[in-house]
Image (spheres, grey):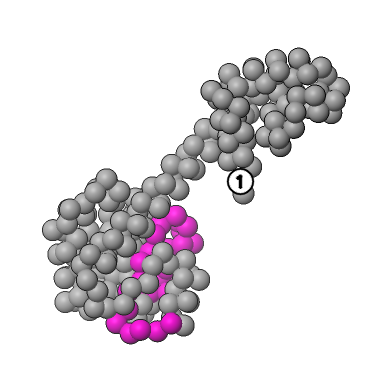
Amino acid sequence: MANDATKDAIVYVIDDDESARNSLEFLLDVAGVRVRSFSSGDAFLKSSPPLTGACVITDIRMPGVGGIELTERIKQKDPSVPVIVITGHADVPLAIQAMKAGAADFIEKPFDDDIILSAIERAVSQKTEEDALIQERREIESRLSSLSGREREVVEGLADGKAYKVIGFDLDISPRTVEVYRANAMMKLQAKTLSDLVRMVTLARLP
């Protein structure tokens, strides 16, 4: 059955093998996962279905646009969409190529039902976590923008592990004034502890 990670997701199955495509579509439908299938990479691209909340499962060898090229094109449109590549041929170089293209997983046919369901769950869960982190970072950046220049300097110093005296010396203010700026910054950032503040700044600094 679909869990919390997959209940809001839609899985696009792309495979020119009709029996394999129908079998996987049936499995996902029974598991409570929303699914839509396509007979080729070209058909998928032509249809241009929404990628928000999607997970893509594509065969690697298909007429026209193959699985690796399809993965690359999906990643160009939305890098956050997880793509699981499946193949009927065990081929290490192809697997490496698929991973370099951005595939979240590479699974050889025939596969057990649990293997593909677990792969989908992992891929969607990871995307959900990444989306949550992106949203949190946006909120933190918005709060950081509300700080005054001096408050931001104090916060940056604290995030670098500097003591109040060192920050005060660097900014030519007293340690007591540093504490005042720190208190004001924590209130604006909605940070309950100093470790909260440091985590926020660290997250905002991530590339």
Task: Give SS at disc 1.
Answer: loop
Q: Nearer the viewer, residue 180 or 71?
A: 180
Q: Quadrant of residue 42?
A: bottom left
Q: Nearer the viewer, residue 66 or 117?
A: 117
The image shows residue 190 at horizontal and vertical percentages of 54, 23
Side (left or right) of 185 relative to 77? right
Q: Does the rendering let one see residue 32?
A: yes
Side (left or right) of 110 relative to 151? left
Residue 9 drawn in magenta:
no
Q: Is residue 167 above or below residue 177?
A: below
The region drawn magenta spans 67-92
Side (left or right) of 2 relative to 188? left
Side (left or right) of 155 relative to 107? right
Q: Is residue 161 above or below residue 8?
A: above
The image shows residue 132 at horizontal and vertical percentages of 43, 42
Q: Residue at x 46, y 70 (%)?
A: 99
Q: Residue at x 80, y 24 (%)?
A: 165
* Amino acid type for the residue under numbered disc 1: Leu
The image shows residue 96 at horizontal and vertical percentages of 47, 76
Q: Residue at x 71, y 37 (%)?
A: 160
The residue carrying pointer 1 sits among few (fewer than 14), some (14 to 19) or many (20 or more) residues within 10 Å by Cα, namely few
Q: Quadrant of residue 47?
A: bottom left
The image shows residue 45 at horizontal and vertical percentages of 36, 66
Residue 89 drawn in magenta:
yes
Q: In this figure, what is the number of numbered marks?
A: 1
According to the image, label 1 marks what residue?
A: 206
Q: Residue at x 74, y 19 (%)?
A: 178
Q: Is residue 130 above or below residue 97?
A: above
Q: Does the rendering let one see residue 149?
A: no
